[in-house]
Image (cartoon, rainbow, N blue to C red):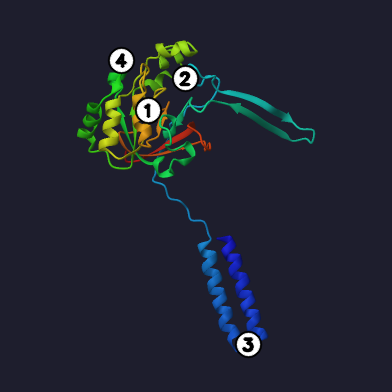
Amino acid sequence: MIKELQKARRRMKSYNESIISTGRLRLYPTLKLLTAVVLFALSYSAKPMALEMPAGKWVDLSHDFSSETIYWPTGEGFKLETVFEGMTEKGYFYDAKKYCSEEHGGTHIDAPVHFAEGRQTVDEIPLDKLTGAAVVIDVSENALKNPDYEVSVADITSWEEVNGKIPDGIIVLFNTGYGRYWPDRARYMGTDKRGPEAVKDLHFPGLGPEAAKWLVDNRNVNAVGIDTASIDHGQSKLFETHRTLSKNNVPAFENVANLDQVPAKGALVFALPMKIKGGSGGPLRIIALVPENQ
């Protein structure tokens, strides 16, 4: 808008100069007034408008990244190294670090291409699929009793009986209660072992394949998320839930935090991943705005 304002000023100045040079001075007061009106209108429209958000509470749904961050047993984990920290030779303080991380660890996103060839990479996911209204389906009562629990179609339809049909274009989050165990790897993952041999010992809840298929076939959801290490449960061998969601271009959020602080419906969620070109996933900063009346 600033550039447009500058262009308008230059055009008006040039036009006024041409009026003067051609002797049509009697029109100049009118043109001067017109110039002032146009410039005022442009400058007014260039002023930033305040974005009004509904009053409410912000909830951080992301775990921080540190040496304690939980990754898949085959992952190396998050590494942060200091490049420089302290006073420079010129007398000012400076701090810079570098980090190394797999795409899939901590609070992160699974882009559809993660389990479906040719589907969206993380940089290709439309922003309107990552932001908007969200519902939280609480299955913690059953999941905390059974570390291999899989969210069922009945869990979803039971939620709808109380809260109404899941609307189109919604983000569906599943609260298993496992967020309370973070960052205790043994309790959160079912094992604190590392390496390929540890995968068979994983035990944590997930979204069942039948429920995932029901969601994509019967509800037009934008994304799904869960407060465990994977959208498939720990004992999954074929990752069918991942595959069903991915081939339908439905991104998944994993290791989501603080879902117990978000109501069953009414919250707004903003889930913005690191924009890695061609990436199959990446670190995710996800937050929720819970309106005051919820």
Give residue 161's position: percent from left, percent from top: 19, 33
Describe the element under mark 4 as helix, strand or loop.
loop
Q: Nearer the viewer, residue 168 or 40?
A: 168
Q: Which residue is mark 1?
A: 242
Q: Which residue is mark 4?
A: 146
Front position among marks 3 and 2 = 2
Where 5 falls versus 218 (above or below)?
Answer: below
Rounded to the nearest angstrom, the CA distance separating label 1 from label 4 is 21 Å
Kind of residue at disc 2? Trp
Establish if 150 lies above or below 87. Answer: above
For the image, the number of numbered tags is: 4
Residue 25 marker: 3
In the rendered image, which quarter is residue 76 located in? top right
Where residue 222 appears, x then y in whole percent? Answer: 35, 39
Q: Can you see residue 192?
A: no
Give 150 or 255, whichever is nearer the viewer.
150
197, above or below 247, in the image: above
Q: Secondary structure at mark 3?
A: helix
| Left/right of residue 54 with respect to residue 89 in the rendered view | left
- Mark 3: amino acid: Leu
Mark seen at residue 72: 2
